[in-house]
Image: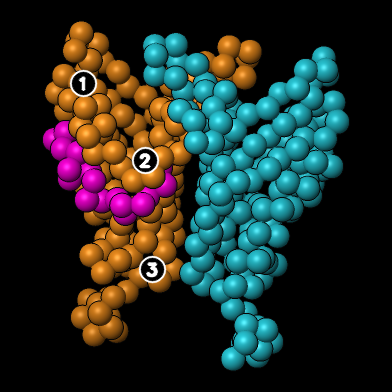
Chain colours: A orange, B cyan
Amino acid sequence: MSKLTSISTAGVTMDSEEVRIRVVIDALATAHRIRDAHMLGELYDKDAVIADLAPPLLSRGLDVGGAQAWLDGWDGPVEVEFKDIVIRIHNDLALAFGLKRTKAVTQDGEVAEWWSRITLGLARTPEGWRIMHEHDSVPFHMDGSFRAAVDLVPGGR
Amino acid sequence: MSKLTSISTAGVTMDSEEVRIRVVIDALATAHRIRDAHMLGELYDKDAVIADLAPPLLSRGLDVGGAQAWLDGWDGPVEVEFKDIVIRIHNDLALAFGLKRTKAVTQDGEVAEWWSRITLGLARTPEGWRIMHEHDSVPFHMDGSFRAAVDLVPGGR
């Protein structure tokens, strides 16, 4: 049975769900590029537990207003690229993790660019896959400086 | 049918799997307390993708030697406590996330204590649940200092 047949007869296969998870991840990038926090908000469960680059430790539900203000703080699109994303799916639960590069221009014309680690927990709802947990972080330098390591690149130390 | 019956007849229920996930999380704490990196290593898949507090961005497989050296660097037990851990399980995939407090005494007699965000992706293997992804981080202060926020407490900002 071809995959196409399997999709059309069984309704949903693991492969088609992985495609759907990747659509959510692509939509994260698009929402950043067009700087639309409402589009971003539609990707999250309203009670999503979010560990972001900035404090607090955890927050509940995407703060759409705060996200829009952050997006608007840049001069032009916020480019987000995902790399080496591993996806695991069982029924209505999915886990995706890997690397994320963010690149944008400040109002002063400076290019800001950093790599972070991204983990997404997703739940399949009647409306589709929604992010129920997001963990986005950079490590920090253990040289006594406690500086956030925003200068790391994949494969480097 | 009681839960007990359901466990004994069906072999495994969601509830008993959640208990097993919590056993893994408790074992993480115990391995830190007794400072046994080999015990720690047994909890991880050999190809686990780990995002730690320290660089690099990601590493593959727990570095048991490095973990033992880190544990040995403290004077006495490394106390780890987990708080508000949410667990989601579907078949052979589990996701756990919440807060983690680490407390230990330096060789200089200073108490070091910090809260971090912890995410675990677990896979059920023939040998039991194993951590296939770990993401442990603190945010950083967005005041221009880029200081790692090791001073945050749950519920605070």
Residue A43 spot, x, y in % from top left: 26, 51
- For the C terminus of chain B, the image quarter is top left
Looking at the rendered structure, whether the residues under marks 1 and 2 are on a common chain is answered as yes
Q: Residue A92: which numbered mark, if any? A: 3
Residue B21 visible in the displayed image = yes
**Vertical relation: B41 (above or below) A34:** below
Does the image show residue B121? no
Query: What span is colored magenta in the figure?
Result: A30-50
- Percent x, y of residue A67: 25, 33
Report the chain holding disc 2.
Answer: A
Q: Tell me if B23 is positioned left or right of A84 in this view.
A: right
**Helix, strand or loop at disc 3?**
loop
Residue B33 lies, with reference to residue A153, above or below; the image says below
Query: Mark 1, residues whose alpha carbon is within 10 Å: few (<14), some, or many (≥20)?
Result: some
| Quadrant assignment, res A101 | top left
| Of A42 and A88, the residue lying toward us | A42
Location of residue B22 in the rendering, given as x and y in whole percent from the top left corner: 66, 59
Marks 1 and 2 sit apart, C-alpha to C-alpha, by 25 Å
A93 to A26, vertically: above or below? below
Residue shown at the point (76%, 41%) measured from the top left: B32
Q: Which residue is mark 2?
A: A83
User: Is residue A80 positioned above or below B48 on the image?
Assistant: above
Residue that mark 1 sits on = A73
Q: Toward the viewer: A128 or B152?
A: B152
Tell if the residue under mark 2 belongs to the same chain as the one under mark 3.
yes
Mark before the other along the chain sequence, 2 or 3: 2
Query: How far, Cα to Cα, is label 1 from label 3?
Result: 36 Å
Give SS at disc 1: loop
Q: Residue at x 19, y 12 (%)?
A: A107
